[in-house]
Amino acid sequence: MTDTVDAGDTISIPGADAWQRAGLTRSEALRRERVERWRAETLSPWEARAVGLVVWLGWRAVFKGFQPLCLIAALAAASWFGARWLDETGGLQAHVGSVPGEESRLAERIRQAVPPEADARDIWIARLEASVRGDARRRADIDRFRSWAALGPDLMGRDWLALDAIAGAAGPRVLDAELRAGPDWQRRQRLDDAWREQIARGRELGLDPPALVFAPEALNRRRADRQFAWAVAREGADGFFRGDHRGQFEMRAVPGLVAGASGTTRLYGGVRHLVIALCAQDRTALSGCDSPIIPPAAADDLSLALAAIESGLVELPARGRSMRSGAEILIAARRAGQLNPQLEAWLVEALPRVLPAVEIRDAVDRAGIRPDIAFAAPARMTQRLAAQLDVRTADGAVVLATVLQRVADLREVTSSFEAIRLMAYPDSAATLDSLQRVGTLSGPATLAVMEWLGEGAYDALLPVPERPQASQEVRRGLILSLAGAILVLLLTLVRVATPARLRRASRTSLTDAWISRLLLGRKL
């Protein structure tokens, strides 16, 4: 079988040969020669017949306008589907605005809790003054005072405090209007600089927290006058909770720590608490429980279980130090009347199941501990009691360890005394977890936050609702229309980037030249 060869490929054609020498392939050179020849033979539109001219104009509109028309149609479809997508997913603001974090949402709730007709500064000063006045014995509640002092910037708003500090006689509203008239970044920088300057001034004055710089000077003087007596009581209490001071601690010595007319408010420490709780029940009493140095107490399985954990007798599935710290706070909160009744009821039900009283007694007996000697010399018995009762695999041990860990974490981010008072708020293990997260966000202001918002503080921890999703039809239409627009745009860019000598040698140019000659007519 012999191959057939187009005559145009072998016959020398001067025009095609010239284009081939210019760099075109033989087929491209032939097409270019034909395009040039046919266009030269075509009548101009002014010379053509009316019918041919009308049809030619229609052809040219299709030939030249098809690609731009496709691009416009694709962009229009993408715009329409994009508008529907925005409408179904919450609008433009839902996509442009940033999602506030938990700390920002908590600060916003604190400001929103201020009644519309009230002044946040007046509320703040009133709470500070009430804390300075203190209890019925006129002892200043400095723990509460410092917590409210730390809450002040969030309650009143840092921007407002900065404006008030630099406004002068004109007032913060006038200054704010002037700053808003300029660029936003200048206003932001001016307020941030003013805020940092005021906080630095508070530190220079020795104020703790530095936000007290925004409080009246008379109030700060009253706080300084009354702080000495509180500091003396606080030093002894701190020493007891740190383990530096042995013996016992009366919680009523710290203003505001005991709620109402509570019963026994004296703390003795881990080993002594264990001895007292053991000797309070006949079924758990050991030899030596009849010693007069052991204070009498009511039989109570919850106190016994918490004391066993506090003393280090029990090994739970978590760090022992955190378990002891959490148990110590729960014991103190219960005796101070600060433990939420619902949380206490949960503990009464849960702890004895994990730590039966008889098993605690047997563990102490195995360690060879005499209650009277242990009460007299608790430090000597600590090592002998350590981890004698392993309940790491017991049912409910993980939940119990989690609760104690949350209490210990809350104590870490606040203080021992604030953690005791904060136990009045959580009514379950779940809300205790939320309280610990609030404490992490608020730090020293946690007590004031819970006093101000109550359970409303937990709302700031709720997950932000997810944006609604667009329908499958809208998503598919938007993707296809955008893909079509991108494809047409790419083809246009390819055509623009192609040199003119190659474009005129294309099959489309050849087709256009042939149809134009056919419709407009051929020169004679």
Image (cartoon, rainbow, N blue to C red):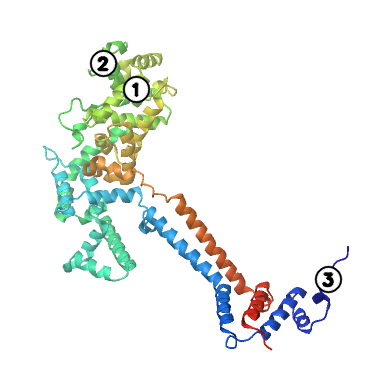
User: Can you give x and y, in whole percent of width and height, for residue 216 in the image?
Assistant: 16, 55
Q: Which residue is mark 2?
A: 280
- Which amino acid type is marked by label 2? Ala
- Whether the residues at callouts 2 and 3 have beta carbons within 8 Å, the answer is no
- Which amino acid type is marked by label 3? Val
- The nearer-to-camera label among 2 and 3 is 3
- Whether the residues at callouts 1 and 3 have beta carbons within 8 Å, the answer is no
User: Can you give x and y, in whole percent of width and height, for residue 493 in the image?
Assistant: 58, 70
User: Can you give x and y, in whole percent of width and height, for residue 457 in the image?
Assistant: 27, 43
Q: Is residue 18 above or below residue 341?
A: below
- Point 37% across, 59% down: residue: 92
Q: Quadrant of residue 181?
A: bottom left
Q: As drawn, is 517 to the left or to the right of 356?
A: right
- Whether the residues at callouts 1 and 2 have beta carbons within 8 Å, the answer is no
- Point 83% across, 79% down: residue: 11
Q: Which residue is mark 3?
A: 5
Bin the neighbour count of mark 2 within 10 Å (Cα to Cα): few under 14, some 14-19, many 20 and up. Answer: many
Assign a secondary structure to mark 1: helix
- Which amino acid type is marked by label 1? Ala
Dot 1 or dot 2: first in sequence order is 2
Q: As drawn, is 67 to the left or to the right of 375?
A: right
Dot 1 or dot 3: first in sequence order is 3
> How many numbered badges does the structure rendering display?
3
Dot 2 or dot 3: first in sequence order is 3
Q: Quadrant of residue 289?
A: top left
Residue 377 seen in the current view = no
Q: Which residue is mark 1?
A: 308
Q: CA distance from mark 2 to mark 3?
A: 117 Å
Residue placed most toward the observer, 160 or 522: 522
Q: As drawn, is 51 to the left or to the right of 367?
A: right
